[in-house]
Each structure stands twice: as structure tokens, then as C-alpha cells.
């Protein structure tokens, strides 16, 4: 086996089943979801997903951001209602019309964003919603909490207020809450996102203990090493579909990485002339911190040529977002330099960086890219209101309208009216409008973060075509993507990011999927053409 | 100022503070559930006019009070539907409710202006308690609705802080998502508490038209609904503190009349203005204090809850 760290902690799944000694538990899944489909406006979050989990085992639900993991679990916990599909608990069909039904069926969920009432004490949070007598007996609850704490090694102070606790402690409160409710199907959404390595080990030791006592534990994650270290069985979700269900023994980290990003795809490339030799953007030994103050970028080096598209691959959360933000001036670099056309633009204010010729298509197109409640004209104006052509003191609304209308026509943005709030538009049209605005500045470099996430095939094609057109004009494009097919199709070179570093930067023609999968899992690649 | 006059002012403070207290208690319950209802003034007026009309037609002030409670609850139901089911902006909906209540009460009460109430809630001393020096004549020589408020305050306090239902109430106001996830029906409970809040506002209105100044006058609440909303902040959403606040405001109100009665040469407009100035000063003071102590408004106050929001 490849993963040394994990070996000591992982017990073979077989022994878990036998230690139960309860025959039916091993045959009938404790929980089964069949053919689950859930649609949100413009998005199919779950598309005919099947999962099953047996008592005594730890399951990993693996997938990229937006693969539909959280939606699926929100259906299982009664928060969302599926459009299609069925849920079986111990072989019995159940319909959950509210979270209460799911709780009654023994399902407990620890959400990524904890569902705790912050001004309340631990004990008050635990007792909340429980069928107790009208008059609260907090001492009894506190005693029960201490019993659970001891049994599973989940130490918390029952009288403490939630806001006084650290995130690790808050998570323990959430788990205690579920155990107090007698949950035997425990779901954890990205449980390790906020934890230190030591806390992660403690958490999984606790979870293993629960599984041994007859629970089914399901945890949602996109971290491959955790899956290999702690799970017995794994279901991989991609694009809302369940693509594989595997036993841990039968798979490897590389295979999981490939499954996550897509294994069978055509390596169809858009034909192109070779990129230029002139370096536009140079990134040198770049370091930065994430929102929590931990290291996000750990020495990134890259040279982007004129008329070149570099695809940044990697599992989300390995520093891609931070890299884009540092380049665009939204996040300070703690070390290192960013050069644009030989000019140092490190830690310059965003306005100067925009003026220098860097355009940004952010990940969150309706939060950061466009203002949902403003119409197309105003959204377009956001980036050009300072130019002399649209007026000095007062904005020349006619000119702005003309600009917006031209962009809408040129980029084939479909909308009912220029005066309609952009939030009414579909994801594809939003992205086209955003790209139109960013391209209209004639940028030197475009930083596009997950530019086709959530878009349908038509819109994806259109976005790729736009990026290619920019490439032909000599613009450098940095494209963060979680989809290898996209990178193979559009990019000239691929840089694989892991742990805030590039594991390798290599021409797409020479890249092998297996090799990239390996680099995504943290093995340094051979193609060290980065700097 | 002699003892009798002091007792008189204090007793008047309690009387004048009682409608504020009822309205504030109702708003505390509503806001604890996470719903901001700025329609208190409208609900009070609707309660006042309904109470008065029913008391006049039945000759029984108790029927009047009951009708006011129902009327207040009915008006608040509009707010509940708009803000809980349709997730409308609660400020707008509340303001609309005030405007609606003011108009409705004016229309309903048109022919009742100037009619004296046949039977009102009159003051009677409580045996034994009324003989306690100072406290007796101030607190225990009042009318039945004042006595009822003495009972209601500790009951509501106990309910909010010491019972399971109170815990649920606070939870849906602080973090409805968390409450929902543990199976508490946020929607139904918010409806219930908005309506209870409206009922208490209705009763507050009835107190004005059946006990405090037993008659119907258009717009007779004169901003007391707004003072009650301010009182909730002053009381940091705690019913016990609302008592002190209500009597303090009542005292300022009563003081104005006393000063006029004593023949002090102060403009009556200034005296009428006093409670409102006082409200502003107290609010500035109270907000800086609560910000320091981290005991602010319920976390989800005035935010609609949508389970499937992404």
C-alpha cells in the first residue's frame, strides 16, 4: 500500500462487519439512496445518484466542489426534497418531508457550517429540538453530555457558550448532538476542512469507535489522502453523477483522482498556432496565506507567454483561488514577485493591476464578478466608468448603453432586456457578459477561475472559443480548472497545483492523465519546466 | 414635593407604563423568534378601537379586552404571512401594518369618537398588599390589567429562559437553520410568536381605550407603539428589564402632566415631547452598552428563513 500514515488507524472493513455479529445488518444497508435527482434553477445538482451504507463502516463521498455531495446529503437529512429517487432506511422506503423525519430515522448530520446557536451553551444546543419535558433540566443534560464525552473521547465543557469554543470543539458539540439524539447514521460534510492534523486523527478515531458500535459513518470530502487513510468504502461523485463505488482495498489514490476529474474523455484539442516566446506574466517564488492565516501559496513559479493558455489543474483548495487573487491584487503576497511585461505589480492595488492589463474572471461570477441586482449596462459600467469616453463628472448613459448593447450583441449574450437585473440570466449568459466586459479592456492577461463551472455544453463551447480568440490576439490566459478534459482541450501547458505549489508544468501534448493524477495527489512530476 | 405627590407620580408611571409594557412584551416575543414587527402602533390602534367598540356594545370591558387581543392577533397574522411565508422585507411589511392599522382604526372608530366608555377597568386596592407603605399605593392600587401584567412578566421570562419551548423560541431567532436541522418547525413557530406578539399589542391598545384614557380618539396611541419597539432594544430582549423601561417611560409621560397640573410655566408641547426625546437618549445609551456586553439583537432578527436557499 501506498499510504503509510493511514495503515495503523485503518481496520479492515471485514472485521467491522463480523464484530457486529448481527446478520441482517450486514445484508441490508442501513441507508440506501436510489436514483436521486435534484435540480436547482439552471443546474442539475444530483443526477440519478445511488449510494448505500452498511452498519459498522466508514464511507467516503468523494468529489470536487460542485459535484453534488452536499446536495445529496442535504436530501438524506431532509433539508432538500429530491425531484426523483427513493431513500431506504434498513430496507424500508422513507420519505423525509423535513429534517425531523430524518432525525427520527436515525440520521444525524454534521454540516460543514455548523448548525449551532452561538449564544447558547453546549448543553442548550444539545437539548435543542429534543422531546423533553417542558421544564428544562440542564443538569441532567450536562450529565448525559459528559457520559457521551467519556465514551467516545469527545471532550467539551457542557456549560460553555458555543462562541467561546474553537472550531474543533464546536465540531465535537455537533457530533455529541447527533449521538445524544441516538443517530446511527452519521454524516459529516467536509469534517476536516477546519481541523488541525492532530484534530483530524482524533476525529477519525472517534468515528471508527462509532462505526464499531454499529453506526454507519459517511463523510464528504475532496481530500484523497483522507479517504485512503480513514474510509472503508468510497463513492465518487462527478458532475452530480455517482461514477464509481469502490472498496478502499481495491483502489488507489491515483485511480480516485482520475475518477474525480473524469477518466474517459476525448483528448480533443482546439487547433492553434504555437504560442509566442515573449513572457508576459512572470510569477516568482510566490507565497501567500489563506483566509484562515495558514499557508496557501508556497513558492509558485510560472512564466506565461504571449498568446498562451496555461491550465492550472489540481484538486480544489490547493491554492488555486489564492493564486488568482494574489495576481489580481485581491490578496497580499507575503513573499515573491509578480511581473507583468517586466513591471513589478506585486501587491499593487487592484485598480493599478487592472490598468496594467490584467482581467479577472472570478470563481464566484454572481458574487464577485457581477452585481446580481444591477442590469447589464450598470455591470458593464463597473469596469469602464473611469474612462473619459463615458463622461467626466456625470456618466454618459447613452454611451454606456451603446457599449453594453455592443457587448451583448458581439458575445451573443441572450437576455430579455438590457435593463433586466443580471441575476435573472442563466449561468452561461452571465459568464459571457462577464467575459465580454473583461475582454473589452484589451487585457494583456486574463485570469479565469473555473470559467465553465456549472455551464451547459453550448455555453462551455462559447467560453472556450472566446478564450481561444483572446489567445490568437496574443493575450496570455491563466485558466484554473478542475476538469482535465477542459485543460486538454484549451490549454497549451498544464500546471498541476498541490499544497500551494506546482508539482509540475508541462506541455499538454506531452502530459499523460496518469501522470497528472499522480501530481494532483502530491507526487512531484517530471516536467519541471516551471521556472 | 411631598410624599403623596411622589406616590401619585409613581402610581401614574405604572399606569402609563402598562400599555408600553404589554406592547414591548409582545414585541420581545416576536423579535425573539427572529421577526421584526414594526406594526406595533397599527396593532395597538386596531386593538384600542376594537376593544372600545366591543366594550360599548356589550357593556363589558373584559369582552372588549378579549376582542382587542383577537384583533391584534388578526392584524399581526398579515405580517406573519408576508414575512414568514412570502419572505417579504420585514421593515416594509411592518410599516405597512402600522399605516393599515392607523387607517382601519380611524375608519372603524369614526362614530365612536366622544362616546364615553360605559364600563372601564377601574382601580381597586389589593387586600393586604395595598397597605404596604409606598409600594402598596404605587403598585397595588391599580386596575385588573395592571395586576395581570405583574403575572405575565415573570411567566414570559420563565417561558423564554427556562422551558423547552423558550429554548426553541430563542433558537429560531438566533439561527433558524440550526433549529430547522434539529427538527424544530421554524415556520409554524414564527407564525405563532408573531401572532402572540400581535395579541399583546392589541391588549396594550385596549388598555389605552378602556383603562388609561377610557374613550376612543383617532390615533390615540400617539407613538406609544414606536416607544415600545425602542423599549425592546433598551430591555435587551429581556422581559424583566422591559418592566423597568416601561415604567421609566411611563414616568416621563406622567411627569409631563403633573408638571402642567402644578402650574409650572413650561410649554405643553415641550412636555409632550419629553417621552420621545427620552427614547432617543435612552436608545443611544442602551445600544452603546449592549454593544459592549455582546448582548445584541437575536442573530436572525428581520432575516427571512428559506430552507433551500443556496
Image (cartoon, rainbow, N blue to C red):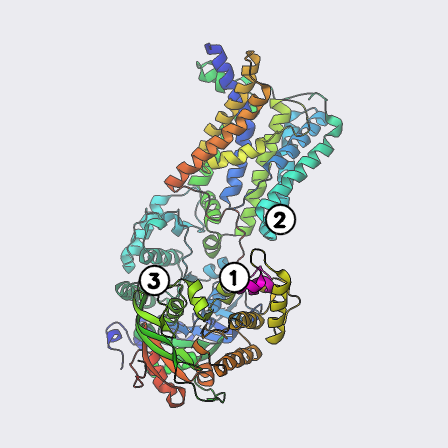
Protein chain holding label 1: A
Q: Which residue is mark 2?
A: B81
In the rendered view, does A177 fall on the left or right side of B129?
A: left
| Percent x, y of residue A388 | 55, 63
Mark 2 or mark 3, which is nearer to you? Answer: 3
In the rendered image, the quadrant that contains the N terminus of chain A is: bottom left
Which secondary structure lies at badge 1? loop
Protein chain holding label 2: B
Cβ–Cβ under 8 Å for marks 1 and 3: no
| Percent x, y of residue A243 | 46, 80
How many C-alpha atoms fall within 10 Å of the one at disc 2: few (<14), some, or many (≥20)? some
Q: Could you tell me how many numbered marks the image carries? A: 3
Q: Which residue is mark 1?
A: A386
Q: Is residue A270 visible?
A: yes
Determine the CA span between mark 1 and mark 3: 41 Å
In the rendered view, does A175 fall on the left or right side of B8?
A: left
| Percent x, y of residue A486 | 47, 81
Determine the CA span between mark 2 and mark 3: 39 Å
Magenta highlight on residue A388: yes
| Percent x, y of residue B277 | 52, 28
Read off the magenta span. A371-391
Q: Which of the pair A147/A286 is nearer the observer?
A: A286
Q: Which residue is mark 3?
A: A194
Determine the CA span between mark 1 and mark 2: 45 Å
Amino acid at each position: 500500500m501506498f499510504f503509510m500514515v493511514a495503515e495503523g488507524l485503518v481496520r479492515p472493513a471485514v472485521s467491522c462487519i463480523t464484530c457486529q455479529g448481527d446478520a441482517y445488518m450486514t445484508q441490508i444497508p442501513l441507508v440506501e439512496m436510489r436514483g436521486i435527482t435534484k435540480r436547482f434553477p439552471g443546474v442539475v445538482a444530483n443526477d440519478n445518484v445511488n449510494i448505500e451504507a452498511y452498519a459498522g463502516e466508514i464511507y467516503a463521498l468523494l468529489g470536487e466542489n460542485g459535484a453534488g455531495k452536499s446536495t445529496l446529503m442535504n436530501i438524506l437529512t431532509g433539508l432538500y426534497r429530491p425531484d426523483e429517487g427513493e431513500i431506504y432506511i434498513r430496507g424500508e422506503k422513507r420519505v423525509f418531508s423535513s429534517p425531523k423525519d430524518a432525525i427520527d430515522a436515525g440520521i444525524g448530520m454534521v454540516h460543514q457550517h455548523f448548525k449551532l446557536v452561538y449564544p447558547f451553551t453546549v448543553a442548550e444546543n444539545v437539548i435543542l429540538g429534543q422531546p423533553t419535558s417542558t421544564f428544562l433540566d440542564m443538569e441532567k443534560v450536562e450529565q448525559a453530555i459528559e457520559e457521551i464525552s467519556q465514551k467516545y473521547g469527545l471532550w467539551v465543557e457542557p456549560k460553555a457558550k458555543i462562541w467561546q469554543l474553537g472550531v474543533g470543539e464546536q465540531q465535537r458539540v455537533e457530533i455529541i448532538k447527533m449521538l445524544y439524539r441516538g443517530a446511527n447514521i452519521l454524516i459529516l460534510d467536509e469534517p476536516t476542512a477546519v481541523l488541525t492534523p492532530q484534530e483530524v486523527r482524533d476525529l477519525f478515531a472517534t468515528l471508527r469507535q462509532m462505526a464499531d458500535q454499529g453506526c454507519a459513518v459517511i463523510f464528504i470530502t475532496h481530500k484523497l489522502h483522507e479517504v485512503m487513510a480513514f474510509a472503508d468504502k468510497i463513492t465518487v461523485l462527478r458532475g452530480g453523477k455517482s461514477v464509481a463505488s469502490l472498496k478502499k482495498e481495491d483502489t488507489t489514490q491515483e485511480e480516485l483522482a482520475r475518477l474525480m476529474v473524469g477518466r474517459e474523455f476525448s483528448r480533443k484539442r482546439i487547433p492553434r498556432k504555437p504560442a509566442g516566446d515573449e513572457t508576459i506574466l512572470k510569477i516568482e517564488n510566490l507565497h501567500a496565506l489563506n483566509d484562515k492565516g495558514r499557508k496557501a501559496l508556497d513558492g509558485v513559479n510560472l512564466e506565461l507567454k504571449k498568446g498562451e493558455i496555461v491550465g492550472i489543474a489540481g484538486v480544489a483548495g490547493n491554492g488555486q483561488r489564492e493564486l488568482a487573487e494574489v495576481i489580481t491584487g485581491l490578496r497580499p503576497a507575503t513573499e515573491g514577485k509578480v511581473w507583468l511585461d517586466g513591471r513589478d505589480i506585486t501587491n499593487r492595488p487592484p485598480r493599478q493591476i487592472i490598468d496594467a492589463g490584467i482581467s479577472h474572471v472570478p470563481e464566484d461570477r454572481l458574487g464577485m464578478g457581477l452585481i446580481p441586482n444591477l442590469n447589464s449596462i450598470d455591470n458593464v459600467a463597473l469596469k469602464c466608468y473611469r474612462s473619459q469616453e463615458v463622461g467626466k463628472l456625470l456618466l454618459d448613459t447613452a454611451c454606456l448603453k451603446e457599449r453594453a448593447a455592443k457587448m451583448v450583441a458581439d458575445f451573443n449574450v441572450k437576455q430579455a432586456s438590457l435593463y433586466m437585473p443580471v441575476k435573472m440570466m442563466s449561468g452561461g449568459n452571465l459568464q459571457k457578459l462577464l467575459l465580454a466586459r473583461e475582454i473589452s479592456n484589451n487585457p494583456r492577461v486574463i485570469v479565469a477561475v473555473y470559467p465553465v463551472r456549472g455551464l451547459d455544453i453550448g455555453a462551455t463551447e462559447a467560453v472556450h472559443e472566446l478564450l481561444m480568440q483572446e489567445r490568437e490576439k496574443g493575450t496570455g490566459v491563466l485558466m484554473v480548472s478542475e476538469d482535465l478534459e477542459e485543460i486538454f482541450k484549451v490549454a497549451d501547458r498544464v500546471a498541476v497545483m498541490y499544497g500551494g505549489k506546482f508539482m509540475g508544468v508541462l506541455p499538454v501534448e506531452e502530459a499523460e492523465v496518469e501522470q497528472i493524477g499522480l501530481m494532483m495527489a502530491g507526487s512531484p512530476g517530471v516536467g519541471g519546466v516551471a521556472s | 414635593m411631598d410624599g403623596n405627590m411622589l406616590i401619585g407620580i409613581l402610581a401614574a408611571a405604572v399606569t402609563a407604563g402598562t400599555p408600553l409594557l404589554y406592547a414591548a412584551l409582545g414585541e420581545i416575543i416576536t423579535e425573539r423568534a427572529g421577526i421584526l414587527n414594526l406594526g406595533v402602533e397599527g396593532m395597538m390602534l386596531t386593538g384600542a378601537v376594537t376593544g372600545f367598540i366591543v366594550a360599548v356594545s356589550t357593556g363589558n370591558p373584559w369582552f372588549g379586552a378579549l376582542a382587542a387581543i383577537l384583533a391584534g392577533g388578526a392584524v399581526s397574522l398579515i405580517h406573519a404571512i408576508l414575512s414568514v411565508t412570502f419572505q417579504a422585507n420585514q421593515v416594509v411589511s411592518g410599516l405597512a401594518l402600522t399605516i393599515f392599522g392607523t387607517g382601519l382604526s380611524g375608519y372603524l372608530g369614526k362614530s365612536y369618537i366622544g362616546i364615553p366608555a360605559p364600563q372601564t377597568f377601574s382601580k381597586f386596592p389589593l387586600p393586604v398588599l395595598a397597605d404596604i407603605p409606598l409600594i402598596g399605593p404605587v403598585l397595588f392600587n391599580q386596575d385588573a390589567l395592571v395586576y395581570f401584567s405583574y403575572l405575565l412578566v415573570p411567566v414570559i421570562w420563565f417561558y423564554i429562559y427556562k422551558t423547552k419551548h423558550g429554548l426553541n423560541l430563542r433558537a429560531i431567532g438566533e439561527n433558524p437553520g440550526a433549529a430547522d436541522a434539529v427538527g424544530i418547525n421554524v415556520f409554524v413557530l414564527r407564525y405563532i410568536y408573531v401572532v402572540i406578539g400581535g395579541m399583546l399589542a392589541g391588549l396594550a391598545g385596549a388598555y389605552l381605550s378602556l383603562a388609561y384614557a377610557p374613550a376612543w380618539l383617532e390615533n390615540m396611541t400617539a407613538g406609544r407603539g414606536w416607544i415600545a419597539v425602542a423599549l425592546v432594544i433598551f430591555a435587551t430582549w429581556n422581559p424583566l428589564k422591559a418592566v423597568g423601561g416601561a415604567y421609566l417611560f411611563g414616568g416621563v409621560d406622567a411627569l409631563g402632566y403633573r408638571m402642567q397640573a402644578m402650574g409650572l410655566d413650561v410649554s405643553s408641547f415641550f412636555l409632550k415631547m419629553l417621552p420621545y426625546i427620552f427614547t432617543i437618549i435612552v436608545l443611544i445609551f442602551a445600544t452603546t452598552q449592549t454593544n459592549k456586553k455582546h448582548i445584541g439583537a437575536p442573530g436572525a432578527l428581520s432575516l427571512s428563513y428559506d430552507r433551500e436557499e443556496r
